[in-house]
Image (cartoon, helix red, strand yellow):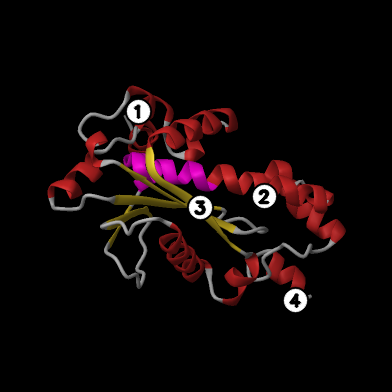
Amino acid sequence: MSASSCLNALVPDFAIEAEYFLKGCKYIAGVDEAGRGSLAGPLSIGLVIYDSSLFLNPPEDISFLINDSKKLTHKKRTEALTCINSYALEKCYTFVPHPVIDKYNINIATMIGIKKLLNMVSFSPDLIIMDGNFKFQLDIPYASILKGDSLSLSIASASIVAKVNRDAIMDRLDLKFPNYGFNSNKGYGTKKHIESIKKWGISPVHRMTYEPVRSMFLK
């Protein structure tokens, strides 16, 4: 099996959470984002905390339903979100608007969003685990985990929370700006989306610092 096939075959579990729990972290927050590479709309960030009692013996429906949101259909993500709602101690999400992304950059926008989430939860987690390779200034410890959304059920859950809620926003933006196909492309730079920008110009929700929008805007 090739390396790429192995990655595609990954199924998230609570092994990472269990390892940190044994090091003294009781409340571990999985964090992930949706819309990082989108040409339009907000960045969505989700946070999910499960009870540590689930780490060594996760319920079958959590293991069966939850995966990296990119590997699930909309219907499967909706089913998974219901499961998350049933088991999570804490579940929340926030949006970072596109002007903030343009003013700073996507990494700083992510940090701003995480800080907003930490102000939304009813208790402070002992540790944040997140997908990617970030270096943030946060008030609590965190660990960046490459392919974390394919490895950790907490991170995968956060990816679903972020994705489902962002998709809903993009569907609403499609009603307001119907020329760009936001309900199908969710703001990402598909060929049809780029053609729509060339034909109709830039909408108020496009990210001006993202290519090819930036080059079009500067002309």
Q: Disc 1 versus disc 3: distance between alpha carbons?
A: 22 Å
Instruction: Name the residue beneath numbered marker 2.
Output: 169
Q: Nearer the viewer, mark 4 or mark 3?
A: 3
Q: Earlier in the sequence, mark 3 or mark 2?
A: 3
Find residue 93 and name its label: 3
Residue at image position (31%, 29%) is 1
Query: Outermost residue toward the front?
Result: 122
User: For the residue labelled by badge 3, is the local secondary structure a helix, a strand or a loop?
Assistant: strand
What span is colored magenta in the figure? 147-162
Residue at image position (71%, 65%) is 213
Instruction: Name the residue beneath numbered marker 1.
Output: 63
Residue 203, how many percent across, how many down?
A: 79, 62
Q: Earlier in the sequence, mark 4 or mark 1?
A: 1
Q: Earlier in the sequence, mark 2 or mark 4?
A: 2
Closest to the observer: 156 or 124? 124
Residue 176, how many percent across, how many down?
A: 81, 53
Question: Mark 1: few, some, or many residues within 10 Å (few <14, many ≥20)?
Answer: some
From the viewer's perspective, tell me whether residue 188 is left or right of residue 3.
right
Q: Nearer the viewer, mark 3 or mark 2?
A: 3
